[in-house]
Amino acid sequence: MFLCEILSLYSKPALISAEFSVHADKVTTMNTYNLVPILIDFHALSPCIIGSGILTKDGLVLESVLPVEQEEDIIAGCGAALSAVARNAARQILQGKMGAVLVKSDNGFVIVSPCEGELILAVIVTTDAVLNEILQAVERTVRVIGQTVFDLAA
């Protein structure tokens, strides 16, 4: 389903763009119907957010809103790998829980943050992003995803 179709249903016409596509793969163990609007709302918070996806810790994509040139399988695999390494480092070195992981490159940042249960939020932002604002938005979105997943499970 393309972003234009999702947005017309969700009535946020300012975000309609042919450069983005929405990937919504249904997983038999979880109804992910309500997660695409969460990602769309997240993207509306900042023009610096290039793409985002809700992944499993195994690297499967549940939902994503990505630029057409981004391959969701690569983002899912890298997001799951970053999450696993950060989770182990937080547990073994810092004796704590993993928070958000930030990777900086010449072209932007990748942020990976754990959600409720076995889920991960992966975000791609531009180099001119105000990271404090983006990280706060990631934390809020993670809470919304967690609440939505909890509501779906109930």
Image (cartoon, rainbow, N blue to C red):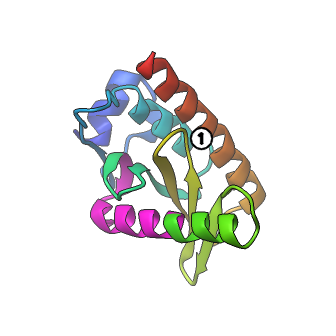
Identity of the residue drawn at 36% across and 66% down: 77
User: What is the x, y in percent for residue 148?
Assistant: 50, 25
Q: In which quarter of the image is the N terminus?
A: top left
Q: What element carries label 1?
A: helix
* Residue 29 located left or right of residue 126: left
- 49 or 138, nearer to the observer: 138
Residue 18: percent from left, percent from top: 30, 50
* Depicted 90 relative to depicted 145: above or below: below
Q: Is residue 128 visible?
A: no
Q: What stretch is highlighted in magenta?
A: 63-83
Relative to 92, is 97 above or below? above
Describe residue 140's horizontal placement relative to residue 4 as left or right.
right
In the rendered image, residue 114, in percent from the top left (x then y), is placed at 57, 50
Residue at the top extreme, as displayed: 154
Given residues 33 and 28, the one toward you in this image is 28
Instruction: For label 1, count other residues whose C-alpha is less than 10 Å away and answer few (under 14), some (14-19) or many (20+).
Output: many
> Which residue is found at the position 69% from the left and 55% from the top?
97
- Given the image, on which type of amino acid does mark 1 rest? Val
Quarter where residue 7 is shown: top left
Q: How many marks?
A: 1
Q: Can residue 119 be found in the magenta stretch? A: no
Does the rendering let one see residue 81? Answer: yes
Residue occupying image coordinates x 37% and y 48%: 64
Q: Where is residue 67 in the image (x, y as percent from the top left)?
A: 36, 59
Quarter occupied by the C terminus: top left
Foreground residue, 107 or 29? Answer: 29
Asked whether 112 or 47 is in front, the reply is 112
Q: Name the residue under label 1.
A: 142
The relative height of residue 27 versus residue 86 in the rendered view (above or below) is: above
